Amino acid sequence: AMSATRYTRDEVAKHNTAESNWIIIDDKVYDVTKFARFHPGGKAFVDASAGSDATKNFYAFHRQDVLKSMASKYLIGTLVDAPSAKKASVTLKPGELSKVPYAESGAFQGLPSSFYDESHHRFRADLRKFFDERVVPDAAANDAAGKPPPHELWKEMGKRGMLAMRIQNGPWLEDLVQNCGVVLPGGITPKQFDCFHELIAHEEFCRLGVPGYCDGLGAGFVIGIPPVLQFGNPELARKVGREVLLGEKRIALAISGPEAGSDVAGLTCVAKKTPCGKFYVVNGVKKWITNGHFADYFVTAVRTGGPGVGGVSLLLVERSEGLETKPIKTSYSPSAGTAYVTYDDVKVPAENLLGEENGGVKCIMH
Ligand SMILES: Cc1cc2nc3c(=O)[nH]c(=O)nc-3n(C[C@H](O)[C@H](O)[C@H](O)COP(=O)(O)OP(=O)(O)OC[C@H]3O[C@@H](n4cnc5c(N)ncnc54)[C@H](O)[C@@H]3O)c2cc1C
Ligand code: HEM
């Protein structure tokens, strides 16, 4: 309501002392009298700007987000006068690309390219708009609060094919479009989708600039689903592939443990076949599992044979009795859902084996 009040430049100019200090930034009026004492850059600079249009000086020393985060409390109104001819900042419309040199990759600022065609431009514009409107407003707050991205957002992205755009092309993409009602970003066809569309999809995620939340929105998925699609039996690959690519269920890749990080071949999490041969029973722990805290599926590296590389298998383990996850503190936001996973006699159908028994490392290295 305060910002609806209109002032003339002359009115602002009257508040030109430390006792009553108004300044203008981007045609908005701030009463910074009380703020001056708390200004991180020192009281003197703020006092010296009293009664003036400080737009140019402000942008010489601050990022634009300082205005939103810190100055909004002191906003008292806007200027009556016509907007100043040259604004120091530009607000982009949702989906609009930046014209600031090097702020976008060259092909998207008019440079010639042999890799990007018109479909890539449509594709990026569509993703950018969705991110600007739906993801950006959610990202910073959830990252700061340490909350994972909402499941609803996953599902929405799944339905728009945005999850599938972050892994390579394959028969699953045709299936999503033909049988699951998915329309790919920018209206591209599964045949058109190439590694440059995939690159763009990753870039648009990274632009969020909040690494914990960004990983929370699929770092586990990006490494977790490919082994299922590549090495799962056709029925499993189709069922789980659909669930995960549509965002209905979430998946994580669980290879590392407290005892085996770089030394994957040394892992000790065990899976024993039941005498009837229909199940594996998994016992052990996994550590640092991104998205694990909210995942429904865990592609788990287990020891099914002797020591070393030749005794490791990959199993798709569903969250079920005996499987528990708890969050691990990391140097980025808990939004990522990084987890410690314990397997205590977890029963897994033998059909959930990915690739061949004791051929797990081959799948991991694929
Ligand atoms: C934030 C985060 C998320 C992760 N997400 C996942 C995930 O989703 N799924 C998953 O399975 N894992 C995940 N990891 C685990 C990650 O894969 C391991 O951290 C990584 O494999 C390294 O293992 P380590 O941490 O046990 O370190 P170590 O293997 O113990 O290495 C410690 C140090 O020793 C060095 N070193 C190790 N071996 C050698 C050698 N032979 N010669 C010379 N130097 C060596 C390393 O370079 C390193 O500096 C995640 C880790 C982090 C930090
Ligand atoms: C409402 C108005 C203002 C707010 C909210 C504000 C906020 C801040 C903040 C948060 C910083 C720390 C650095 C950063 O995070 O970017 C800072 C530094 C600074 N500010 Fe301001 N400021 C305001 C107005 C001004 C004005 C009018 C001037 C006048 C020139 C000014 C000059 C400076 C300077 C010189 C620094 C130090 C920069 C450095 O360390 O390199 N500020 N300000």
Image (cartoon, rainbow, N blue to C red):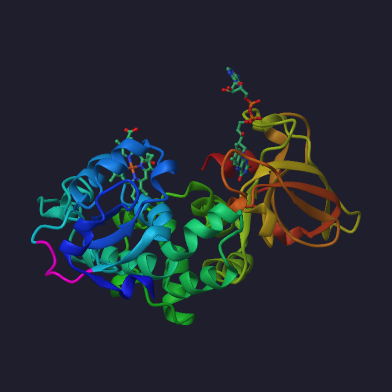
Q: Is residue 357 above or below residue 22?
A: above
Q: Which residue shows up at 64% across the image and 66% down it?
A: 236
Q: Quadrant of the N terminus?
A: bottom left
The answer to which image quadrant residue 167 occupies is bottom left
Q: Which residue shows up at 59% across the image and 64% down it?
A: 237
251 or 208: nearer the viewer = 208
Magenta-tinted stretch: 79-84
Hey, which residue is sitting farthest right in the picture?
275
**66 magenta-colored:** no
132 or 238: nearer the viewer = 132
The answer to which image quadrant residue 198 occupies is bottom left
Q: Quadrant of ligand 1?
A: top right
Q: Which residue shows up at 67% across the image and 38% down it?
A: 256
Q: Is residue 65 left or right of residue 275?
A: left
**Residue 200, position as x, y percentages in the image:** 32, 55
- Residue 226 visible from this viewpoint: no
**Residue 324, position as x, y percentages in the image:** 80, 54
Dominant secondary structure, magenta:
loop
**Residue 233, position as x, y percentages in the image:** 62, 62
- Residue 334 visible from this viewpoint: yes
Q: Is residue 86 left or right of residue 301?
A: left
**83 magenta-colored:** yes
16 or 75: nearer the viewer = 16
Q: Is residue 3 left or right of residue 105?
A: right
Q: Tell me how many marks there are.
A: 0
Q: Which residue shows up at 47% across the image and 67% down it?
A: 172
